Amino acid sequence: MAHGEILAGFLAPHPPHLVYGENPPQNEPKSEGGWEQLRWAYERARKSLDELKPDVLLVHSPHWITQVGHHFLGVPHLSGKSVDPIFPNLFRYTFSLDVDVELAEACCENARKRGLVAKMMRNPKFRVDYGTITTLHMIRPQWDIPIVGISANNSPYYLTTEEGLDEMDSLGKATREAIEATGRRAVLLASNTLCHWHFHEEPALPEDMSQEHPHDYAGYKWDMRMIDLMRQGKTDEVFRLLPQFIEEAFAEVKSGAFTWMFAAMGYPQIPGELHGYGTVIGTGNAVMEWNLVKAGLAGAQRRTAA
Amino acid sequence: MTVVAAFLVPGSPLPLLNPENGPWRPLMSGFARAARSLAAARPDAILLYSTQWMAVLDELWQVRPQVSGLHVDENWHEFGDLPFDLRIDVELAEACIAGSREIGVSAKPVDYDQFPIDTGTIVASTLLDPEGRFPLVIAANNLYHDGPTTRRLAAMAAECAKAQRKKIAVVGVGGLSGTLFREQIDITDDRIARPEDDKWNRKILQLMEKGDASALERVTGDYVKEARVDMGFKHYDWIVGGIGGRYFGAQVHGYGPCYGTGAAVVEYRL
Ligand SMILES: [Fe+2]
């Protein structure tokens, strides 16, 4: 029977500013650049992803919010123009993507088996959210790998953070089982910002980097503390601190992508590779990679060992 | 008189997408009655605020003369599509942007092809004005604005309309109690999720009917907390701000559940 596996997980935040700064043909507004540190971090991540040659990219996005269950994109091809409701001046992106519906259905089915409410999104006119699109563009601008898009059920906000993240843990485990059963070689993308305190006004020129810095020092210190633990592979400690981090740094990881990804990977105690860190309108963003192939937990090395 | 009508209406797409479903019929007929009142009031523009158009930086105002397209709700996609074709009173919206800045609220125009129009705006405009007779002024719900700021914005917008010698209808789009069924339900059995919520909603609606705005003020804080009211009931603040703080009573045209949450179509007597 097909034995799929997760090759790697990336913390892959979605500020639309990064797409805007890059000026790809798909995005209507044009910039003078900006946020280079983060864009170059994504360049390194792109290279890594390229070497992994996955069959599919799975992304969990906080900007597809659902109340009744966890939803999965379930239409083979989706296209349209995505305009960011918060930063329409920066992000008006024409997208076209292919969905691995078979894997999405398996994830949905497994989530149900684990007691979650889960649903397929079958409406062909659905507009994919800007978080999903930004993360996917930044990690793989060629759009040549099928994807699975997963909504952020609002349970961490509607229930308690802990109850909500418990659901994301189950969702992650269900995702892993589906990947294994369908024989996919998969990469997971957690589309999350860290510290989420932000400025309330944009500079006249949004890419004027002389105006860009962390919103507050306490939030910055939290980000560094968490990243440092991740770089050391102290995953248990990261998750012990996560609720406090969420509370004090208003961290976007509350929406669940980060927990989903780690649960799917089995919370490996391996060092994450920091590709780069930067702020966007004051929020903290890290591009990080947990490469299970390099760590000997997946891929050829694992097969030889087995 | 500048304000010729004022309504509180729900932004859930469920009744519009399933008008025949029993539990949602009172809301649909409530909308129909409200639409007749609105048509009779013949406003020059509708001043509309929907809790579902969320902003975080500035106060946003739609200024594109015509916005049309097709929207699919991110949670209720299985129930169908929401086509829309809205006409905007750009002159009044521009005045509101200048006016926002004058009262110390940073504001920005929104004028982009395919900008995502929120479900609540589409539902309310479709059901209150099915023929699209009246142009709209649409303002965003900035998540960092409190009730008093929302009132000041609406009051400012009404002043702008007055300066332009326009008659307006003020519309707040949002729900009542916010406890939603989080699992799949049989929609023909929909009901208010918790009896306590139902009690709270009815109490609030009764105070509106009596025109007792000050008694309502006194309990709003508890209502919002205990019944998890949609967005802190800021859509009500919008209405109160827009009509100058006073109404003499209200008619509840329809009340009922939307997947467990509370919803009502209310017309205020001015
Ligand atoms: Fe975000």
Image: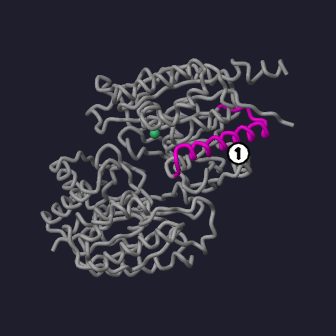
Q: Residue beneath label 1, please? A: A107
Residue B89 versus residue B242: which sits nearer the camera?
B242
Q: Residue at x 37, y 35 (%)?
A: A197
Residue B220, picture quadrant: bottom left
What span is colored magenta in the figure?
Answer: A159-187
The image quarter containing residue B205 is: bottom left
Query: Left of A4 or right of it: where is A259?
Result: left
Chain letter for the residue marked with disc 1 in the picture: A
* B258 to B254, vertically: above or below: above
Query: Whole-percent x and y of residue A136?
Result: 55, 35
Which residue is farthest right?
A1
Residue nearest the observer in this picture, A96 or B264: B264
- Our reading of the magenta stretch's main secondary structure is helix
Where is residue A7 shown, x and y percent of the image? 69, 27
Quadrant location, the N terminus of chain B: bottom left
Identity of the residue drawn at 28% across and 49% down: B59
